[in-house]
Image: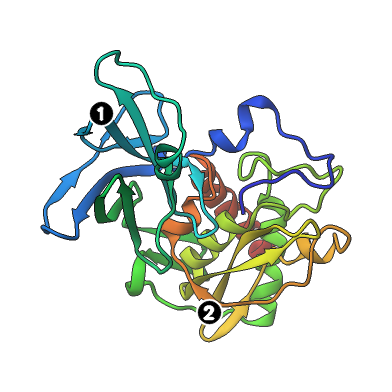
Amino acid sequence: MICRNYAGDLTLGAGNRMASIRPIDSIESIVVTYSDTGETRTLDTRQGSANHFFPSFVVGNDQIQLRLDWSDLDANGQPTLDADFIDQQTGKHRALQGKRRDAHHTAASLGPARHYVWEFNGLSRQFSVTVSWRASVSETLSFTSTFSAEVIRASDRKVRALTEDTKDLVQQALEQCWSLETSVCYKPEIAPLSYGQCAPTAAVVADAFGGEILRTQVPKKDGTSVRHFYNRIDGQRFDFTRSQFDDLPEYWGPVVYDDINSSLAEAMTEMLPGQLEAMRAAFRKALDEQRSG
């Protein structure tokens, strides 16, 4: 999950607000496919922006700029489609009132694909979005002479059994790994070590042991909820960051596992650039120490 304030105490500095959590920095390209024509187009980026931009177009007296805002994600990790309305004569942004306000924010349709339907003043544009992530395709992790794991992305990843003894070693290794480098939520003086660490944890466990990355929604006592990532390996569920909920019963509602199929790409939308790499390096070292100790 992306870090939210915990009990009013875990307050992030201005440089670590939600708006700075930018999966855009881990995206290689965005390709849009228009539903009516089948036409595809690669979207542009702009320096310093957390958006991917469509070519602008004109409706009436408005020049319209559509953009995918990766700093504003919904509960399923999909970016909001924003529309900016610019007066053609003055070049200034129009006030968001009436139909313009209604068309300013558009959420992705429900379902596994990123699909959007944008409507304004009788015009409708429907399209799907394909994301190419910057990520290595494969590598080999060697922890000791008796333990190695070949990391293969997607369905080719090999599944390796996680026995009870190995599970304990993995848990101990993960607890050594969690830090401010792996999650901006890290605040051990007021929150469990595992708080906010679910996405990078699920990623490195899947790297080492294969299986699937799953997600569920966990309710908070204030009525909102957050995404939570965990693993399923050889048919068995493993949640190595469950303690963040169990140790804070006054903050969280009951955890119900929906076991929704997820992916490394979706988990990465909950990480800042560099966090996955930091977690992988720390996990490799910590697990090696646990097995040789």
Residue at x 67%, y 52% (from the top left corner): 196
Q: Is residue 216 above or below residue 221?
A: below
Task: Please identify the residue farthest to the top as the structure is shown.
Answer: 90
* Numbered label attached to residue 233: 2
Image position, residue 169 (x, y; %): 68, 68
Q: Which of the 4 image quadrants contains residue 223?
A: bottom right
Residue at x 59%, y 79% (from the top left corner): 162
Q: Which of the 4 image quadrants contains residue 42?
A: top left
Compared across the picture, whether 111 is left or right of 228 comes to left
- Marks 2 and 1, Cα distance to the nearest angstrom? 51 Å
Task: Please identify the residue farthest to the bottom as the structure is shown.
Answer: 235
The kind of residue on which mark 2 rests is: Ile
User: Label 1 belongs to which residue?
Assistant: 63
Residue at x 55%, y 58% (from the top left corner): 75
Image position, residue 105 (x, y; %): 44, 44
Q: Secondary structure at mark 2?
A: strand
